Image (tube, rainbow, N blue to C red):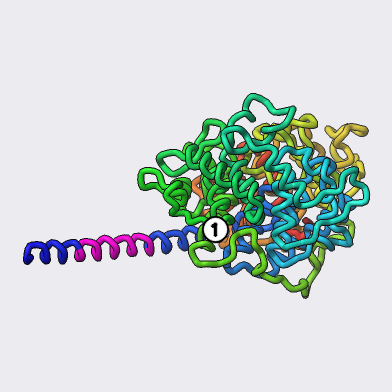
Amino acid sequence: MKIIMKKTIALVLFLVFVMGFAAAASAATAVQLDSVIADTAQYIYKTVKNPQVGSVGGEWAVLGLARSGYEVPEKYFQDYYTTVESYVKACGGVLHKKKYTEYSRVAVALTSIGRDPRDVAGYNLLTALGDFEKTIWQGINGPVWALIALDSGNYPMPENPDAEIQATRNMYVDEILRRQLPDGGFSLFGGTDYATEGDEASDPDITGMALQALAKYQHRSDVRKVTEEALSRLSALQNNDGGFASWGTANSESCVQVIVALTELGISLEDSRFVKQGNMLVDNLLTFYMEGRGFLHTADGSGSNQMATEQGFYGLVAAQRAENGKNSLYRMDDAISIPDAVYEGPKAGEGLYGKHSDVSAVPVARPGKTFADISAHVNRPAVEALAARGVINGKTEDIFDPEATMTRAEFAAIVVRGLGLGENESSVFSDVASGSWYAGYVGTAYNYGIVKGVSDTAFYPEGTITREQAAVMAAGAARLCGMDTSLSDGTVRDILAQFTDYVTSSGWARTSLAFCYREDILSKDDLDIRPKVPIKRCEVAEMLFRMLGVLNLL
């Protein structure tokens, strides 16, 4: 009897120890989650200073920050809304003629900040989602994101008078169910006549997103059945490290979409189906985290780490909200409410006080413009924002060539276009031929004090522009736009001394370089200035994008 009693006491003590250890481990995980979310929120707020209408550097950043509880100044979201209004006005309410997920993505972001997508600059952005055929054209992403957008704010189904087939919610649900694959999951074009070989197997990202869309329709028995089959398929696809691979490559975003799916469905992230060899989804996602630098797309750093960061962030936010018993990511009855902006200075996009009267913001002319070779590029948001406004062009319609260099004439041209200035030739430079494509741009840049020549009579238009030359031109543009670019010698020295190679910069460029670093037109995260190194096209786009943001011209 005593032996049994001793064994019982020992067992109780062991269980108390184990339960106490588990509780401590859970608490530590919660603390770690809070810390990573705070760090990543700060990183996104710092790097996405002027969120645009776009899948990177735009809606996902806004969504994550708005749903995270991180303290973001109201002006950040107000400026984003002003940007959306300007964008919508510029394209006459048509965000894209074929990709209707553009409407859904913007609607989700607006809902997350308490703004109604049914009235943006007088346009109802949800009307497009009433067109069934055009919405489903994009693959399963169309109906999936239409449902997520409509349900995020419990919006009524919009009527689209131009639609051949008026959509309903149930039609979108049925369309998703119809596209289920035999293995239980989903792929982008699976279940359609135009599916390719790669669409025959389930993709974890698409399966996760399909479940997110179906989460609010579990009252339907057919939806519950498909949901359980899809969950089983995801469980089978999960790797032993707790993560997922898409198209044969383990990545962070696949893990994110499954996390969001489970939290939308109200399923614990500790559900035994999604714990492999002790590794859970959040455990895996955190392996892609870089302190102070966001998230990697893949372990080797390939792909778009900015997109991975924004999606990794809102994935952790979804996990945190579930942990704290809050509404899920896309159930936005508790969305923040951003009041109308009250500006003491110029409104967003109107420039700074003191700018030259000829300077003006350039409106969007080509909404959704992008290039095939920047899909995973870190400077993609900058390139797309400038390309949409016609400020910067590609080498061809579909190729940007981000790593190529740029001539002095090309740089002068994009600065002039970026400031909304007209072309006006000048005869001051003997090597700028009248009638050449760049003559008007160089003449305008010179007349407004943005550029100088390499001598009194030569501009060297076809010469490759260096980083320090670009900084000087950027500072010239900033002066024209009302900024004081003068700095004391001590300030210049203090700013540039953090870079190991600042002594290699030219004396005539140092004040401009210091100004550009002070205003974050050039990134202060750089280790070196590399002043005499040719600046790349992607770097030019990033530099000009940041500059226009500082000048309040976006």
Horizontal and vertical percent position of residue 181: 62, 34
Instruction: Reply yes or no: does residue 38 show up in magenta.
Output: no
Position of residue 38 relative to residue 375, above or below, is: below
The front one of 35 and 517 is 35
Position of residue 487 relative to residue 162, above or below, is: below
The front one of 102 and 156 is 156
Amino acid residing under circle 1: Gly
483 horizontally vs 26: left or right: right
Residue at (62% x, 28% y) in the render = 200
Horizontal and vertical percent position of residue 190: 67, 33
Q: Picture quarter containing residue 378?
A: top right
Q: Which residue is mark 1?
A: 266
Most extreme residue toward the top is 197
Instruction: Reply yes or no: does residue 15 show up in magenta.
Output: yes
Horizontal and vertical percent position of residue 468: 65, 45
257 horizontally vs 430: left or right: left
Position of residue 406 relative to residue 276, above or below, is: above
